[in-house]
Image: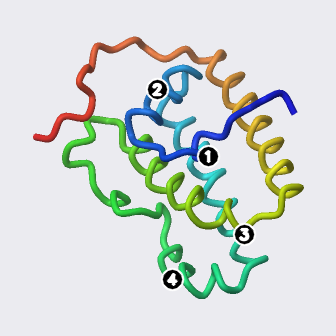
């Protein structure tokens, strides 16, 4: 492994995810594709872990998942950063902790590949720079 750190290995918040997306040049479409990658990972884990599925399966019956899944009231166009933070914290506090080390390494490899794939896509369609600080003020 190349020392790649998963964004949800520690507590993640919307600002950290926004920075992660900005660093990689993801636009809203690529942000959703990244979110979908994580969402599908959770569904995979549930198929392997009946306890996880029993406890949280009902909350994953609708896409997207999370407390902010249907809201855009203060997100100012950054809904995927917030939704990904919700999902990332779920992964970091549940599914990821219960995984054997070899599965964690395999997922880290897949994650690194996905980020590289999305970064290449981002290079093909550069995102317009915006001055949206503070991006997450409540209105």
Q: What whole-number distance in Å separates the C-alpha atoms at marks 4 and 1?
A: 24 Å
- Residue 45, numbered circle: 3
Residue 116's x, y, as percent?
74, 28
Residue corresponding to mark 2: 19
Out of 93 and 87, give the one closest to the viewer.
93
Mark 2 element type: helix
Q: Earlier in the sequence, mark 2 or mark 4?
A: 2
Q: Earlier in the sequence, mark 4 or mark 1?
A: 1
Q: Which dot, 2 or 1, sits closer to the camera?
A: 1
Q: Earlier in the sequence, mark 3 or mark 4?
A: 3
Q: What whole-number distance in Å separates the C-alpha atoms at marks 2 and 4?
A: 31 Å
Out of 76 and 103, give the one closest to the viewer.
103
Residue corresponding to mark 4: 58
Q: What whole-number distance in Å separates the C-alpha atoms at marks 3 and 2?
A: 27 Å
Quick check: marks 3 and 1 in contact, CB under 8 Å?
no
Q: Which dot, 3 or 1, sits closer to the camera?
A: 1
Quick check: marks 3 and 2 in contact, CB under 8 Å?
no
Mark 1 element type: loop
Q: How many marks?
A: 4
- Residue 9, numbered circle: 1
Neighbour class for label 1 at 10 Å: few (<14), some, many (≥20)?
Answer: some
Q: What whole-number distance in Å separates the C-alpha atoms at marks 2 and 1?
A: 16 Å
Mark 4 element type: helix
**Eyeballing the image, is 87 above or below 61?**
above
Neighbour class for label 4 at 10 Å: few (<14), some, many (≥20)?
Answer: few
> At 35% across and 63% down in the image, what residue appears?
67
Residue 89's x, y, as percent?
50, 55
Q: Earlier in the sequence, mark 2 or mark 1?
A: 1
**Eyeballing the image, is 81 above or below 64?**
above
What is the basis of the colouring in this image?
A: rainbow
- Residue 81, numbered circle: none
């Amino acid at each position: 492994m190349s020392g790649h750190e998963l964004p949800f290995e520690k507590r993640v918040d919307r600002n950290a995810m926004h920075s992660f997306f900005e660093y990689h040049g993801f636009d809203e479409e690529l942000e959703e594709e990244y979110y979908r990658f994580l969402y599908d990972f959770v569904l995979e884990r549930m198929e392997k872990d009946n306890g996880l599925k029993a406890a949280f399966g009902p909350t994953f019956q609708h896409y997207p998942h999370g407390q902010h899944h249907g809201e855009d009231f203060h997100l100012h166009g950054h809904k995927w950063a917030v939704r990904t933070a919700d999902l990332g914290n779920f992964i970091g506090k549940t599914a990821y902790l219960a995984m054997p080390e070899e599965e964690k390494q395999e997922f880290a490899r897949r994650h690194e590949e996905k980020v590289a794939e999305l970064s290449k896509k981002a290079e093909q369609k550069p995102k317009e720079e915006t001055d949206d600080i503070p991006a997450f003020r409540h209105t």
